[in-house]
Amino acid sequence: MNIIVAGEKKEFKDGITIRELIEQENVENPEYVSVSVNEEFAKSADFDTQKLNEGDEVEFLYFMGGGAFFQK
């Protein structure tokens, strides 16, 4: 089955879950990653059970805090 991961078409076994994809893709800091499937955020509680389908588009996203530096 083909899935698009971060813009790259890749082949995986049928019925792969989000958690399995995270492991196979060696995602850094998997406990902090957000995953979007077809531009919809997946709930981290569902990573173990949500299966991906042929042609799905998956992105791994990290949200960072930050601020602005103002100099007077």
Image: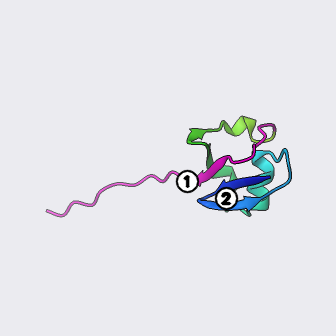
Residue 17, given in percent of the width and then of the height, sits at 80, 45
Q: Mark 2 near mark 1, Cβ–Cβ under 8 Å?
A: yes
Q: Residue at x 82, y 48 (%)?
A: 16
Residue 13 appears in the figure: yes
Numbered range of the magenta stretch: 49-72
- Which image quarter: residue 51? top right
Q: Residues within 10 Å of mark 1 (few under 14, many from 20)?
A: few
Q: Is residue 11 above or below residue 42?
A: below
Q: CA distance from mark 2 to mark 1?
A: 9 Å
Residue kind at label 1, given as amino acid type: Tyr
Q: Amino acid at mark 2?
A: Asn
Looking at this view, is 55 or 66 the one in front? 55
Q: Is residue 27 visible?
A: no
Which comes sooner in the sequence, label 2 or label 1?
Answer: 2
Q: Is residue 48 above or below residue 61?
A: above
Depth order, front residue of 11/36: 11
Q: Which residue is mark 1?
A: 62
Residue under numbered circle 2: 29
Q: What residue is rendered at 75% in x and 54% in y?
A: 2
Quarter of the view holding residue 49: top right
Question: Horizontal and vertical percent for residue 29?
Answer: 67, 58
